[in-house]
Image (cartoon, grey):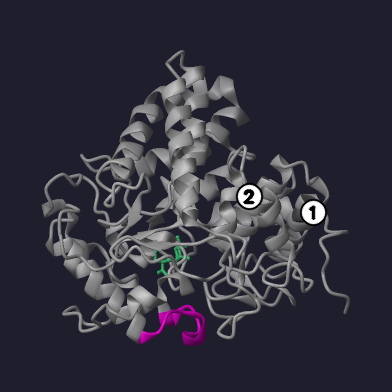
């Protein structure tokens, strides 16, 4: 059988199948990322889901964001997860681990995690508005969302700028969205794994152990989550051991800040302040550029060490207007580390690295959201041919394999769970 190349896939079929997955994963107010493995609402998933959903129902896409905003904390944070109270046994750590309603500043009416995820929300809100401005205005969608998004970004640029570098820090690998990325390996080596919470792994009932983080990694994940929770999630634990500045997280913050400028302009409010903030984040990102890799990388905010590893996270600043290293980033993208060896979608980790694994979660496989982000960046740079190639493969591989969580970048073989919502939503989005 010829390798799928994205050509010849029927857009109507992709759109119909993608819409059916989103319909099946809808739960009254929000979409679950996948029915078995991820039974709650996840923060950045909801933004990606809403980007696709707006094509079939801008109203429902707005509801998706409203449901997430209902979990916002007093300090402005949007939580990693808003829990479904009926599914506490089905995912760990769940609501009974976080006990968020007894943490000062957390919402009383919704159970949430204390961590966050990458800030792609303002971008999604602006796209939802653009899909049907009249419907959005009727529901005052931008008026309602704008102050919440401003507070969210205020939290990230305020309390999360732990180093005073102009970059937001993540305090847990789960906050990166790229959980077991090699970017976190060095820091993870110094994190204890003797958590107090029994290590329950409902995830392993829905995905192969070889496609999920290891038990040792989970011990460390739980240890950090316990420590963060036990310090009331207040970001004031001076000896807290995991503080990383991630290029993906901070790029999405800058892109979303630019969307806030568009939203403010639409509402007749000052937009310049948002453009300036986006510019400041983009300038601060330069501290993470690694010339010998030809891409950006993550920095340990405690030691100041920049990780010398090329990951898809480090290509994301390509999304920023006026990107100074666009040529180098494109060369890296098209070189042997990423697409050069004939990949169909963008590998999550340097294909030339000895520990690259094309089947293990964020340590090699290609993800649909990352590939879609790269295609967006290529489009903005006028490289529409390559953007179309990637988008074609997103739609084709998604529909061919029942909307998998991730795929082998070269063969397209499916991995992780199936009927995965952001895969369905972004496949749908590629058909417009
Ligand atoms: C994965 O992360 C969760 C923890 O948040 C997990 O492994 O259990 C990641 O792929 C993350 O990016 C995603 O948001 C989440 C839900 O799809 O799953």
| Number of disc labels | 2
Q: Is residue 381 above or below residue 4?
A: above
Res. 62 in view: no
Residue hosting label 2: 325
Q: Is residue 9 above or below residue 432?
A: below
What segment is highlighted magenta in the picture? 204-215
Percent position of residue 379, x then y: 73, 43
Specify the quadrant that holds the N terminus: bottom right
Q: Nearer the viewer, residue 304 or 188?
A: 304
Q: Is residue 193 magenta?
A: no
Badge 2 marks a residue whose secondary structure is: loop
Q: Which mark is residue 159?
A: none
Q: Residue at x 72, y 72 (%)?
A: 336
Percent position of residue 288, x then y: 47, 56
Mark 1 nearby-residue class (10 Å; few <14, some 14–19, many ≥20): some
Hey, which residue is sitting farthest top in the picture?
268
Q: Residue at x 27, y 54 (%)?
A: 112
Percent position of residue 366, x then y: 63, 68
Q: Left or right? Give the position of 321 relative to 167.
A: right
Res. 132 in view: yes
Q: Left or right? Give the position of 193 relative to 419.
A: left
Badge 1 marks a residue whose secondary structure is: helix
Residue hosting label 1: 386
Q: Quadrant of residue 169?
A: bottom left
Q: CA–CA distance between discs 2 and 1?
A: 18 Å
Q: Left or right? Give the position of 307 relative to 193.
A: right
| Ligand 1 placement by image quarter | bottom left
Q: Is residue 205 magenta?
A: yes
């Amino acid at each position: 059988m010829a390798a799928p190349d994205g050509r010849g896939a029927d857009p109507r079929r992709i759109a119909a199948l993608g819409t059916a997955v989103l319909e099946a994963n809808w739960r009254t107010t929000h979409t679950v990322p996948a029915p078995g493995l991820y039974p709650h609402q996840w923060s950045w998933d909801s933004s990606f889901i809403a980007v696709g959903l707006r094509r079939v129902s801008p109203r429902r896409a707005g509801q998706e964001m409203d449901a997430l905003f209902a979990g916002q904390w007093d300090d402005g944070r949007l939580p990693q997860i808003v829990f479904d109270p009926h599914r506490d046994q089905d995912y760990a750590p769940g609501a009974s681990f976080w006990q968020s309603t007894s943490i000062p500043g957390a919402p009383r009416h919704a159970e949430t995690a204390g961590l966050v995820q990458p800030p792609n929300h303002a971008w999604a809100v602006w796209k939802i508005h653009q899909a049907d401005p009249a419907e959005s205005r009727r529901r005052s969608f931008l008026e309602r969302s704008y102050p919440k998004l401003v507070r969210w970004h205020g939290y990230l640029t305020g309390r999360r700028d732990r180093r005073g570098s102009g970059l937001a820090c993540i305090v847990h690998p789960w906050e990166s969205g790229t959980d077991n990325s090699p970017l976190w390996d060095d820091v993870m080596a110094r994190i204890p794994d003797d958590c107090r919470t029994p290590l329950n792994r409902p995830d392993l009932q829905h995905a192969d152990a070889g496609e999920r983080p290891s038990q040792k990694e989970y011990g460390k994940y739980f240890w950090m989550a316990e420590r963060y929770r036990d310090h009331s999630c207040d970001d004031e634990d001076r000896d807290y051991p995991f503080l990383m500045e991630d290029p993906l997280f901070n790029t999405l913050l800058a892109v979303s800040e630019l969307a806030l400028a568009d939203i403010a302009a639409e509402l007749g409010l000052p937009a310049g302040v948002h453009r300036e903030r986006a510019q400041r984040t983009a300038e601060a990102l330069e501290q993470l550029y690694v010339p010998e890799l030809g891409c950006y990388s993550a920095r340990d905010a405690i030691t100041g060490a920049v990780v010398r590893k090329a990951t898809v996270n480090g290509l994301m600043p390509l999304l920023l207007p006026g990107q100074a290293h666009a040529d180098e980033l494109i060369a890296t993208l098209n070189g042997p580390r990423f697409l050069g060896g004939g990949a169909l979608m963008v590998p999550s980790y340097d294909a030339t690295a000895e520990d690259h694994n094309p089947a293990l979660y964020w340590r090699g496989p290609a993800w649909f959201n990352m590939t879609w982000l790269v295609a967006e960046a290529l489009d903005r740079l006028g490289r529409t041919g390559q953007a179309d190639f990637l988008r074609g493969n997103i739609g084709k591989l998604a529909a061919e394999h029942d909307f998998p969580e991730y795929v082998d970048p070269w063969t397209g073989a499916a991995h992780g769970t199936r009927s995965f919502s952001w895969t369905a939503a972004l496949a749908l989005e590629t058909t417009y």
